[in-house]
Amino acid sequence: MQIKKAGVALLGLGVVGGGTYQILRDKREMIMRNDGVDIQVVSVLERNADRVRELGIDGALVAGGIDEIINNPKVDIVAEFFGGVEPAKTFLIKALLAGKSIVTANKEMFSKCWSELEQAAKQGGGGLYFEASCVGGVPVIRAITDSMQANRVLSLKGIVNGTTNYILTKMSDEGADYATCLKEAQKLGYAEADPTADVEGYDATYKNSILSSLAYRRRVPVDRIYREGIKDVDVKDIAYGKELGYTLKLLAVSKLRDGKIEARVHPAFLPDSHPLSFVKGSFNALFLQGDSVDDVMFYGRGAGALPTGSAIVSDIVFAARQCEHRRFDFETDGEPAEFTEDFSSEYYLRFDVKSDCGTLEKVAGAMRKNNVSLKSVLQKSEDTLVFVTHEVKESVVRKAIGEAEQLSGVDRVAAIIRIEE
């Protein structure tokens, strides 16, 4: 076997960057033997000298800036670990224009700047690789792009954020409230000191944008995805959902219906029998439906130094072996995307009501008047009503809820949770 050599530059040696370096160092011989590629780290960009020494990296490999890496003829592939849009975007576009391939796990930057990166890659001739941007170490990107050719992807549902899945699992298993579970997640390192990106659903929205664009071969921008986080989830709704046979998860959902794409991120109830209901703690999973293969699920660690590093290294090896790099030019190739924001779902609705007679019938009447069919009705206490609807459009159920809120005897709609079968 002829061995192909590839030089790699690592931009940042944080948790994932350090994990990637360790894998490339420790698995170099195995990769050479199995894949015929000799991957060598030839440059790093890292200001923390202690981190460089901790990883045992030769100080001579530390670059003084991005231009030194761009102008280094030994660098074939640039792997970025900064996070955020800048300076990652600027650095990677420079690398692409110089003809180098890039590898990134940066879902925010990639989902927002994909078209610019693609154009730079096309101009420079390098490749654009992003397996680690979604679902950590679980190999979902190439599964969608290289293993689903016989399918038109009809829908995807994913638990793609480990922080929120840990919090909701703990709320469900222990009956603890959101604030308590968030603090525990922060203590264990599952949540950042500022958890906004995770708990408000931004992280899952970036991943949904990438996954849906690949699944439907049409660009699904971040700003076309409905987003709702978990900070307002009440543990009592999780408990009532259990009684009804449901498990609550923060889901990234997208569907292709009648040629239009609906894409959303929000808490959702799943039947207890659904495979995603069994995904607990910080684990992630993606559930795909194809018109030929039917249902497929990918499951595993969604974050961490070595799991994410595993996906990064996979991309590095894959990029090094390519003679021609794949392009995803959604702006000019394929059908233009059409979107719908008035999606259909079943709904769980909880009303806080005054403890007088007739309120249940009044609310049920408002639902019937607006053609919202009820699947089940529960009076949990004198002041709590729970309704589960059949599938209905978002606009219709919102109108019915608005009318119900005006009824005497109704204090407020305390919870609106969509149900995914």
Image (tube, rainbow, N blue to C red):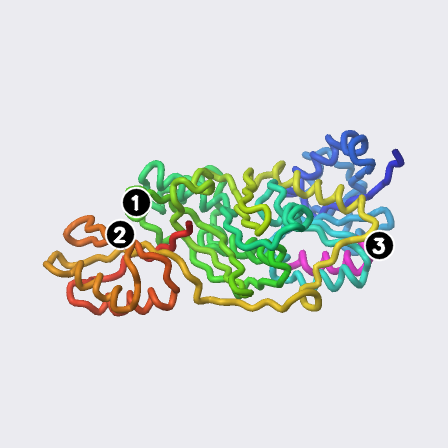
Residue at image mark 1: 244
Residue 56 in sight: yes
> Relative to residue 133, is residue 257 depicted above or below?
below
Q: Secondary structure at mark 3?
A: loop
Residue pictured at 51% horizontal, 39% vertical: 283
Pick whichever, 289 or 194, lies toward us: 289
Residue 27: % across, % down = 74, 31
Magenta-highlighted residues: 85-100
- Residue extending farthest to the left is 357
Discs 2/1, front: 2
Residue that numbered label 3 is attached to: 71
Does label 3 or label 2 sit earlier along the sequence? 3
**Residue count near mark 2 (Cα–Cα under 10 Å), binned few <14, some 14–19, many ≥20:** few
Q: Position of residue 421 (x, y in %)?
A: 42, 49
Label 3: how many Cα within 10 Å (few below 14, some 14–19, many 20+): few
**Distance Cα–Cα, label 2 vs label 1:** 9 Å
Q: Position of residue 382 (x, y in %)?
A: 14, 52
Residue matched to label 2 = 376
Report the magenta stretch's main SS.
Answer: helix
Residue 98 in magenta stretch: yes
Residues under labels 3 and 2: Cα distance? 66 Å
Queried whether the magenta region covers residue 375, the answer comes back as no
| Residue 29 x %, y % | 79, 30
Q: Nearer the viewer, residue 371 or 276?
A: 371
Q: Are marks 2 and 1 in contact (CB under 8 Å)?
A: yes
Q: Tell me the element at label 1.
A: helix
> Is residue 190 left or right of 368 when viewed as pictured?
right
